[in-house]
Amino acid sequence: MSSKPTVLIVDDERAITDLHARWLEDSYEVRKAYSGSEALESVDESVDIVLLDRRMPDLSGQEVLEKIRERDIDCRVAMVTAVEPDFDILELGFDTYINKPVSDPEQLHDIVESLETRSTYDEQVQRLLSLASKKATIESKKDSTELGDNEEYDDLKSELSSLRERLADTATDLDDDDLRAEFHGRNTAGSKLVNGTDATNGDG
């Protein structure tokens, strides 16, 4: 049995799915799904990380994500999509939101490695990083007036602040740029992934 983490790549654009699989197959056990229904057939407790397209014709990435969480499968999920984020993402149970295209193998490996590291943390730390990702993503797309008028955004900020206070001592003991950036304001490769800096338009 392989000791490599298992990554499930889900995208209805076969060329993207196959390309990302080739980029990762030397370092990870890779599964591929070309639709939401195939994703639900492929995901189980052995899957560690899911790279999930949001817009697919049969089941959307949002529906797939909801089913994964309903099944209590303990995996990290990155939404990898060209869908522009709106306030609705604040209710979704993903770990990070990545804008297409993922342009090179190194970028994809950085995404997966960041999620792999998160899997080693406890539930509270994972929740903090997920909230931080949502906050950074929505702040990159909305102006201050829109943010100030949104109740869900206010709730997210309150929960994130509370988590930061509870976990401040823990953060100094964890060697991870994503996490330490939350407490020390560092600009890191991980925080760039959280912000989805490679935003572009596309079909997925």
Image (cartoon, rainbow, N blue to C red):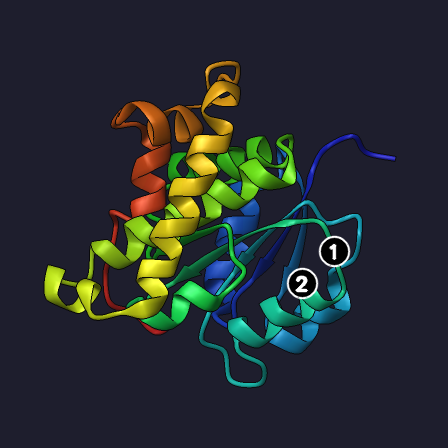
**Total number of numbered discs in the rendering:** 2
Label 1 to label 2, Cα distance in Å? Answer: 6 Å
Residue 83 in view (yes/no): no
> Which residue type does callout 1 highlight?
Ile
The label shown at residue 106 is: none
Lateral position of residue 83 relative to residue 12, left or right? left
Query: In this image, 90 relative to 39: left or right?
Result: left
**Label 2: how many Cα within 10 Å (few below 14, some 14–19, many 20+):** some
**Crowd band around label 1 with a 10 angstrom C-alpha radius: few (<14), some (14–19), many (20+):** some
Q: Position of residue 152 (x, y in %)?
A: 36, 66
Q: Nearer the viewer, residue 73 or 48?
A: 73
Q: Is residue 13 visible?
A: yes
Instruction: Say what amino acid the circle numbered 2 marks.
Output: Arg
Q: Quadrant of residue 26?
A: top right
Question: Which disc, if any, is residue 73?
Answer: 1
Q: Quadrant of the C terminus?
A: bottom left
x and y, in percent, of residue 21 in the image: 57, 49
The reply to whether callout 1 and callout 2 are in contact (CB within 8 Å) is yes
> 176 left or right of 193?
right
- Using the image, determine if residue 79 lies above or below residue 193: below
Where is residue 20? Give x, y as percent.
50, 50
In the picture of the structure, the residue carrying the numbered disc 2 is: 69
- The residue sitting at 68% across, 64% down in the picture is 68
Name the residue at 71% across, 68% down: 70
In percent of the image, x 25 and y 47: which residue is there? 197
